[in-house]
């Protein structure tokens, strides 16, 4: 997290962050003083750089790596993993760990940035709220976030945001300094700020504009996930990271804490800012494979999982690179649905982060990578082939 200068900690922030009863807003000079400390001592991680404290002692946490013996029939597997810049691989079958791979020097219990796999975690978090009737996917976004009225997202439905069919002026070119996606990175603290950047993600989202023809065309746009996270905050009354913890992460039986980067207002970077271990990431895939159940605990409804993997209208994604790799594929509830004969589906992030779920073989593959390029059609083809070979071994 980027340290704030000695100014108001709530400048441009979400209204709920302003401490009740304070004469003035807290600053880095005053946050330890009454009355500011009543709020600040419970929110230190929002304005002071922090590090995680593992919920298990190190000597208890460490355990042997499962190795790749179960996947010995996959041709040249180690070489292919190395050539695809693998930072970690975990394979589950029927919920059991059967194989792992980490290159030399990588801690199997360490965390790794998920990039846009974070979007699929947001989709599941929204699903838990839909299950309880707290979010209606058919309602307009501005019903849940009035501050987005008049923006590109205000008159779109929540479902259109989930499926990325919102008509929004947004350039997702990761290499273009003038793109909106780089602007989001700057606001999130991932790149140096420019003088005219909005103060926080809330302001950035409210300023986005579009043509208003929603539901017609698939447009991959990272901002939409942050809109969903804002909805989650307003519906639950929690910060986004707290909602993910309570509604999803704490119920998965994870071995470690996850992390999320936050902007100057404390807003979690929902579209790409989560980090976790590969073993814990595989549990997210296991949750999907088992229709929202894990270790006997119901986390999200089977109806939500079913609607997700059924996918949306393939015509909206016609002509995309995704459909060149997965003909007829769709994007649904923040997951990629291949519509292949195997019915496999996945979560993906730039530079090679994946959860791959293959119902036909009851297999989940989680992979961390550090590709030199953000994303290419070739890398997507290489990984689809690799994952399917892994899933077929011993099934």
Image (cartoon, helix red, strand yellow):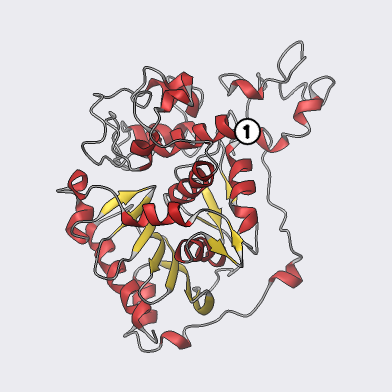
Q: Nearer the viewer, residue 257 or 185?
A: 257
Residue 342 in the figure: left or right of residue 333: left
The percent position of residue 91, horizontal first and vertical second, equals: 47, 74
Q: Name the residue: 64% across, 42% down.
A: 242
Q: Nearer the viewer, residue 373 or 323?
A: 323
Residue assigned mark 1: 3
User: Which residue reaches farthest right?
Assistant: 34
Specify the quadrant that holds the N terminus. Answer: top right
Asked whether 355 or 343 is in front, the reply is 343
User: x, y (%) of residue 4?
Assistant: 63, 28
Q: How many marks?
A: 1
Element type at mark 1 = loop
Q: What residue do we see at 33% from left, 55% from top?
A: 336
The reply, left or right, for residue 123 in relation to residue 211 is right
Is the residue marked by circle 1 packed among few (<14), some (14-19), or many (20+) residues within 10 Å? few
Q: Is residue 38 left or right of residue 187?
A: right
* Percent of width and height locating residue 384: 29, 68
Q: Is residue 351 visible?
A: no
Instruction: Return the x and y of residue 307 as percentages of the image width and height.
Output: 37, 52
**51 in relation to 387, above or below:** above
Q: Is residue 79 above or below residue 55?
A: below
Indicate whether 173 appears above or below 5.
below
Residue located farthest toward the left when viewing the structure as drawn: 319
């Amino acid at each position: 997290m980027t340290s704030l200068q000695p100014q108001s900690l709530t400048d441009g922030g979400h209204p709920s962050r302003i401490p009740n009863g304070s004469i003035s807003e807290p600053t880095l000079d005053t946050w330890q003083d009454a009355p500011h400390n009543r709020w600040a001592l419970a929110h230190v991680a929002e304005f002071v750089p922090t590090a995680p404290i593992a919920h298990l002692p190190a000597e208890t946490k460490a355990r042997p790596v499962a190795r790749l013996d179960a996947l010995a029939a996959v041709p040249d597997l180690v070489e292919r993993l190395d050539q695809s810049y693998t930072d970690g691989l975990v394979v589950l079958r029927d919920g059991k760990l059967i194989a792992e791979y980490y290159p030399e020097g990588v801690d199997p219990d360490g965390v790794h940035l998920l990039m846009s796999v974070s979007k699929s975690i947001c989709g599941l978090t929204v699903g838990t709220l839909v299950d309880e009737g707290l979010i209606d996917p058919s309602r307009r976004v501005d019903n849940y976030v009035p501050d987005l009225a008049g923006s590109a997202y205000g008159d779109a439905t929540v479902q259109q945001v989930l499926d990325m069919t919102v008509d929004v002026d947004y350039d997702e070119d990761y290499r273009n300094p003038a793109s909106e996606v780089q602007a989001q990175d700057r606001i999130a603290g991932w790149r140096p700020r420019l003088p005219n950047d909005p103060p926080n993600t809330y302001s950035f989202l409210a300023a986005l504009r579009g043509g208003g023809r929603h539901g017609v065309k698939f447009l991959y746009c990272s901002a939409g996930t942050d809109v969903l996270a804002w909805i989650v905050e307003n519906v639950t009354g929690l910060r986004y990271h707290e909602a993910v913890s309570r509604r999803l992460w704490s119920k998965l039986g994870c071995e470690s804490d996850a992390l999320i980067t936050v902007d100057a207002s404390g807003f979690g970077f929902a579209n790409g800012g989560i980090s976790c271990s590969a073993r814990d990431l595989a549990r997210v895939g296991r949750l999907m494979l088992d229709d929202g159940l894990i270790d006997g605990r119901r986390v999200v409804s089977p109806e939500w999982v079913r609607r997700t993997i059924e996918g949306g209208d393939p015509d909206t994604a016609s002509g995309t690179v995704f459909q060149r790799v997965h003909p007829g594929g769709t994007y649904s509830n923040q997951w990629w649905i291949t519509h292949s004969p195997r019915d496999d589906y996945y979560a993906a992030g730039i530079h090679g982060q994946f959860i791959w779920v293959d119902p036909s073989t009851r297999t989940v593959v989680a992979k961390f990578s550090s590709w030199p390029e953000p994303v290419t059609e070739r890398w997507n083809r290489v990984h689809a082939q690799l994952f399917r070979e892994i899933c077929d071994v011993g099934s």
